[in-house]
Amino acid sequence: MTALPETPLLETRGVWQRFGGLVANSDVSISVGRGEIVGLIGPNGAGKSTLFNLIAGVLPPTQGSIIFDGEDVTNLPAAERCQRGVGRTFQVVKSFETMTVIDNVIVGALIRNTVMRLARKKAYEVLEFCGLAARANVLASDLVPSEKRRLEVARALATEPKLLLLDEVLTGLTPVEAQTGVELVRKVRAAGVTVLMVEHVMEIVMPLVDRAIVLNLGKVLVEGKPTEVVRNPEVISAYLGDRHAVGA
Amino acid sequence: MTAETIIQSLASGLLMGLLYGLIAAGLALIFGLMDVVNFAHGEFLMIAMYATFFLFAFFAIDPLLAAPLVAAALFVFGAVVYLLVVRFAVRAKANAGMVQIFSTFGLAIVMRGLAQFFFTPDYRSVTHSWLGGKTVSVAGIFLPEPQLIGAMVSIAAFVALYFFINRTDFGRALEATREDAGAVALVGIDKNRVFALGWGLGAALVGLAGAIMAIFFYIYPDVGASFALIAYVTVALGGFGSVFGAFAGGIIVGLVEASTALILPPSLKSVGIYAVYLLVVFIRPRGLFGSM
Amino acid sequence: MDANFAQRRRRDLIMAFCLAVIAALVPLFVKDVYVQNIMVLTLMYAALSQSWNILSGYCGQISLGHALYFGLGAYTTALLFTKFGVLPWFGMLAGGAISALIAMALGYPCFRLRGHYFVIATIVIAEIALLLFQNWDWAGAALGIDIPVRGDSWLKFQFARSKLPYFYFALALACIAWFVTWWLEDSKWGYWWRAVKDNPDAAESLGVVVFNSKMGAAAVSAFLVAVGGSFYAQFVSYIDPESVMGFQFSLLMALPAVLGGIGTLWGPVLGAVILIPLTELTRSFVGGSGRGVDLIVYGTLIVAISLALPKGLVSVFSLFPWRKEAAR
């Protein structure tokens, strides 16, 4: 394991998000170190997606601040965070449906490569890396769901992020597809990219992540090594409570 | 400008506004049901006006009596348009929004062409009717009877629509289909049937409006165009898809038009309506009563 | 694969060049003024539609108010010439610049609107401009402006006797609009626009500044359309608000692209080449009596094509394997 450097890559400090009367995040302070794979988990409605959107810059938090790479990015819009090195995927895939796979990735590559030829080259490299090269000239709308997930990752990687935010990229895949997904995430980290991934299903992510942060009811419940977290009684009851609620 | 002229203008504006609301109601209903803007809406109005005119010219039926007949005829027409054109437009796999706009636009052009072909471009009018040209005086304000009756018909139509949507099985099916067309299919409601009836109902409403308008407006192939834009603005102002937003939108449009005519030359009276539309959507991008 | 792409781009360019050369030679064989007139209009609408396509097709912001920019171009040129004696060539650039600026000024509030709210806003803004011009006495109000024609002159870009100079200018305009589109298609802007059209949220997450993209598309689109308007003013030498700013122009500009294939490089050209001659011919053969047959034919065509070929006429060509990508 690599030792954590002094300054984390990402930090949220006392972040709150309210929607009218609803509190989606209350006083969330987390940090993600450089080179880590961190899992953000929790039952449905725990506020994972909201926190994710706050980090990606979809909306500013009601209160609190977000520090990325030593800089306060709290009020920066999504596009500028991408410029600074935050890449993301969407839980509900948002491919550019009328564009080909390669063109989808070129959109991402353009932020670091202003010359078209280089952006195109970069996009091909990323597709190769993600195992999508064979599908380069297919329309995004013609991809199967697992390929669309992979395209999301490829597009985000093309922006050369320091931090990659993965929103439930492994959920809903077959075991084989999930396994290739896990390998892709490991490869991404090996390439020097820090990963923060939201997952609902613990079984998939626990073997993959270095550290897990569990959110429940908008708050950080526990964080620590995956092996510790899964045995934590509070986590178990949060998840069981969730399952009961789903069953009811 | 005296207080009387102002009140007089606003009163006529209000009456006209209620009619605008009635014209727009069908547009709002159809949009709310299936997210389709009927760009041939003005031509529906034109057809209704011609139908009223011919019932008058050939059978000496007064527009007031003709109104239910015209509404019934337009109901059939609306349903047929859905079944022949719109049904296919909403199925388009690519550029759905574009297909939907331009197929109804194309239909509008065809309808105008057909009207020119069969009815000639001449201006027609219902030369004498029970209400035409008459006014009533209320506390010193003169109100033209056709507009007054039109406003009452409009209010009655909206009340009826309210009960229809909330109290009848078909109304509930309509409401359910607009909420979730997919789920509705599961409980055995035929989506196409509901949509066709929705188009029929929307057209019937504009038919009612057309019959009233025929009393005091010239009838010619392009007449719809002048009202269509007002109808779109009315619907958008209220918030797309909200039928009762259209009612409120209509009143606002009527009043704004009348007040603009007080300040600016009459040729610029529409500028007020358009400006208010822009002002509203710049502040509330989904109209006054539109849900986000 | 990369080679494939470059090859396709080159083939488009060569094809456009060949078509332009062929078009340039046509007047040598076709001397009929009536036919030449139709050719001028076809080229003009190809250029206008190509320009409209940049904002509405590539960037997905459907404008049905582009008559505003067409009218602004026409009026700027005509007013500068008749009031101040400024040559139309400068008027053309001035009209383009003014339109681009106005497009951005209007885009500032309008680009927050989505879907039908945006479409209606574009119609309404053009209508307001139309009404204002109809009441603007200095600009000739509803009567419009008569541009005095004092014989043939390239300097003043007016030709009383021959339509040929207009033809070549319209051809140049169509080529420029096509080339600008071709060039932008494989540029940062081209990719950004298509991304914005398909999914603005995802685009934003990839560093695309959605608002700026829309503004850029609006400016380019308005500039080119205004140049077309300037040309039209010189071509007909008489303009009035309804004839250059009326809603029908917004529609006529959109239709070739829609029918040919919206958001494609060749759609507007193909649409204009089919639609404009057909309209003009039906109008003169069957519509002369004002009986509306031309409208019936035209309208039926629009309904039929938009229902049968939602991707436009270019999608027919995608049956050939080598054009598959072009007809997206």
Image: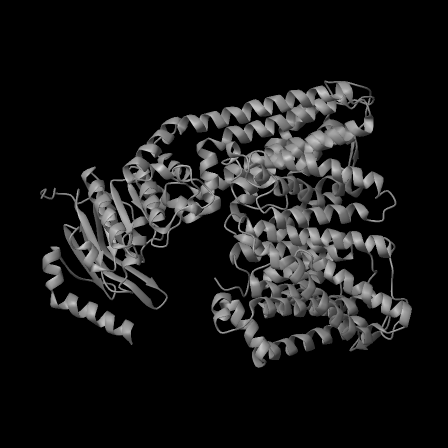
Tell whether B205 sits left or right of A241: right
Snapshot quadrant of residue A225: bottom left
| Closer to us: C83 or C144 | C144
Q: Residue B86 vs residue C299: left or right?
A: left
Q: Can you give x and y, in whole percent of width and height, for residue C221 in the image?
A: 58, 36
Q: Residue at x 22, y 53 (%)?
A: A13
**In the shown orientation, is residue C312 left or right of residue C82?**
left
Q: Which residue in the rendered view is the most extreme toward the bottom?
A: B167
Which residue is rendered at x = 29% and y = 54% of the image?
Answer: A173
Q: Look at 35% across and 29% down and name the residue there.
A: A121
Question: For residue C173, what is the image quadrant?
Answer: top right
Image position, residue B13 (x, y; %): 72, 66
Residue displayed at 59% across by 66% down: B192
Q: Which residue occupies the foreground of this view, A237 or C204?
A: A237
Tell which of A85 and C190 is nearer to you.
Answer: C190
Whether residue B133 can be seen here: yes
- Which image quadrant is residue C164 in? top right
Q: Is residue C237 above or below residue C165?
A: below
Label count reads 0
Is any part of residue A159 visible from this angle? no
Q: Position of residue C154 (x, y in %)?
A: 73, 18
* Coordinates of residue B163 in the picture (x, y in percent): 61, 80
> How has the structure been colored for display?
one colour
Work out which quarter of the rendered image holds the N terminus of chain C and state it.
top left
Image: C155 above or below C134: above
C269 is higher (above) or lower (below) than C15: below
- Residue at the outermost front position: C320
